[in-house]
Image (spheres, rainbow, N blue to C red):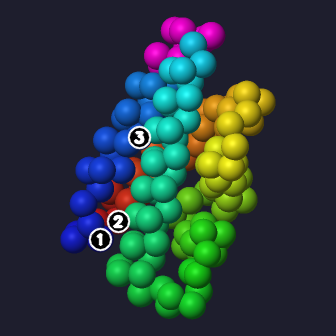
């Protein structure tokens, strides 16, 4: 992992956390909430991409084993990089639900999911930092 720069993931997590704090201060600001959902989208995308890169380049996992996002999360769980594959799959499914259509109820549900995602993302970052 020494050739993988984790700075973009760390910055994304910091920005997501800052956004969440701003929403907590302005609970009825839908525009702000929607911006935090956007931060969630790119943070989870960076997360799975870093996992995939680490699995392939450092752990030499065959590409045929990790063909989908679900495969990546399950393999990362098997190798103890994440605590719960199904929770990560739920995070990613929430991320995908934002790209189909805008709906207030979907936005609220995704926001709740991103609150669950933040501690998982922070833990992943710490694990990746320690395996370098």
Q: Are marks 1 and 2 in contact (CB under 8 Å)?
A: yes
* Rendering coords of residue 72 (x, y %): 57, 72
Q: Nearer the viewer, residue 105 or 92?
A: 105
User: Along the polypeptide, which appears first: circle 1 or circle 2?
Assistant: 1
Magenta stretch containing residue 84, yes or no? no
Judging from the image, what secondary structure is the residue with disc 1 in? loop
Residue 19 appears left or right of 106: left
Instruction: Identify the magenta region.
Output: 21-28
- Examine the rendering and report whether any part of residue 49 can be seen: yes
Q: Residue at x 37, y 42 (%)?
A: 12
Tell me the quarter of the image containing the N terminus: bottom left
Disc 2 to disc 3, how far (Cα)?
Answer: 19 Å
User: Along the polypeptide, which appears first: circle 2 or circle 3?
Assistant: 3
Label 1: which residue? 1
- Crowd rating for badge 2 (residues with CA inside 10 Å; few <14, some 14–19, many 20+): few
Magenta stretch containing residue 25, yes or no? yes
Magenta-colored segment: predominant secondary structure: helix
Q: Residue at x 62, y 49 (%)?
A: 99
- Examine the rendering and report whether any part of residue 91 can be seen: no
Going by the picture, which residue comes out furthest to the front? 101
Disc 1 to disc 2, how far (Cα)?
Answer: 7 Å
Residue 57 appears left or right of 105: left
- Crowd rating for badge 1 (residues with CA inside 10 Å; few <14, some 14–19, many 20+): some
Label 2: which residue? 131
Label 3: which residue? 13
Q: How many marks?
A: 3
Tell me the quarter of the image containing the C terminus: bottom left
């Amino acid at each position: 992992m020494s050739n993988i720069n984790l700075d973009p993931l760390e910055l994304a997590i910091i920005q997501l956390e800052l956004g969440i704090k701003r929403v907590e201060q302005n609970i009825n600001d839908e525009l702000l909430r929607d911006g935090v959902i956007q931060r969630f989208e790119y943070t989870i995308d960076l997360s799975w991409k870093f996992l995939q890169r680490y699995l392939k380049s450092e752990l030499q996992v065959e590409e045929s084993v990790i063909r989908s996002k679900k495969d990546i999360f399950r393999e990362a769980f098997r190798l103890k990089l994440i605590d719960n594959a199904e929770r990560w799959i739920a995070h990613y499914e929430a991320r995908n639900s934002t790209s189909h259509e805008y709906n207030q109820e979907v936005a609220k549900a995704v926001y709740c999911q991103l609150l669950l995602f933040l501690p998982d993302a922070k833990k992943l970052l710490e694990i990746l930092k320690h395996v370098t």
